[in-house]
Image: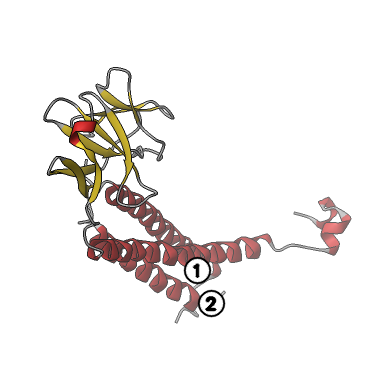
Amino acid sequence: MNRSLTREQTTTIVQGILCLVLFIVLLQVWLLSATTHAWLGGDDSVLWPAAAASAACALVNFALLRCLNRLAV
Amino acid sequence: MADIDQAAWRQDFPIDWPQDHYVARRDFTRFLVLASLPFALVQLGIGIVNWFRRNRGRPPAKAIAPLAEIPIGGVLSFTYPDAHDPCLLLRLDDKTLRAFSQKCTHLGCAVTPNADKSCLYCPCHKGYFAVENGRPLAGPPRRPLPRITLENRDGVVYAIAVEVNAS
């Protein structure tokens, strides 16, 4: 897939993936915190949308991990 | 850097730092992706727990005390719906009764009526709640106290439901 990429280019891609994954994980942390707060306050309307959003974030992260694993070390 | 500047042990055990950083970034990314999965699972778990709680139905009514035995301005402690859920019943005037969970919505300390019974007070972090509706008035709590729905059945006060209000 990326035999033509130089080491520096691959490093840049890895850094980009790392930034994206980090951002998504932080989003999940915020989502969990906000959901827990709402739930403990008696508002359960956000639970399933938040769970779906968090699952989507996890799927995106796994897709990014797949891209990462395809890059040659 | 020339080899001559390096310590002898560095020359014997050279470390390829670019390679080391390169692998560390990848491993850190993998770790983050693995951490992402538990977050999603916990979110799903909260939804499932909430679903079970909703389908558990209302707790059975529980007699607290005969109305005549509760003095005006008096406070009575009881447990509802389980023996581990302490609550407070307050008789504000002749006809007004209020009951709330005694667990502070901040960190779960026991709230008590203050001296003039104008509000409920949490001594742990100085949280105050209104006795009329359990709304937080001051201090760290942001959510109201769960309110116990009361019913007067033939002169006896019953707890019949728990209302967890959104703030």
Q: Which amino acid is tagged 2?
A: Ala
Q: Disc 2, disc 1: CB below 8 Å?
A: yes
* Residue ID for mark 2: A72
Q: Which secondary structure lies at badge 1?
A: helix
Few, some or many residues within 10 Å of mark 2 (<14, 14–19, 20+):
few
- To which chain does the residue with label 2 belong? A
Q: Residue at x 14, y 31 (%)?
A: B96
Q: Is residue A66 left or right of residue A37?
A: right
Vertical relation: B101 (above or below) B119: below
Q: Which amino acid is tagged 1?
A: Thr
Q: Is residue A54 left or right of residue B123?
A: left
Q: Position of residue A22 (x, y in %)?
A: 43, 57
Residue occupying the far top of the picture: B116
Q: Residue at x 79, y 55 (%)?
A: B2
Q: Which mark is residue B77?
A: none
Q: Which secondary structure lies at badge 2?
A: loop
Vertical relation: B37 (above or below) B121: below
Q: Earlier in the sequence, mark 2 or mark 1?
A: 1
* Residue ID for mark 1: A10
**Disc 2 to disc 1, C-alpha distance:** 8 Å
Q: Does residue B143 appear in this view?
A: no
- Residue A53 sits in which quadrant? bottom left
Q: Do circles 2 and 1 both sit on a common chain? A: yes
Q: Position of residue B153 (x, y in %)?
A: 13, 45
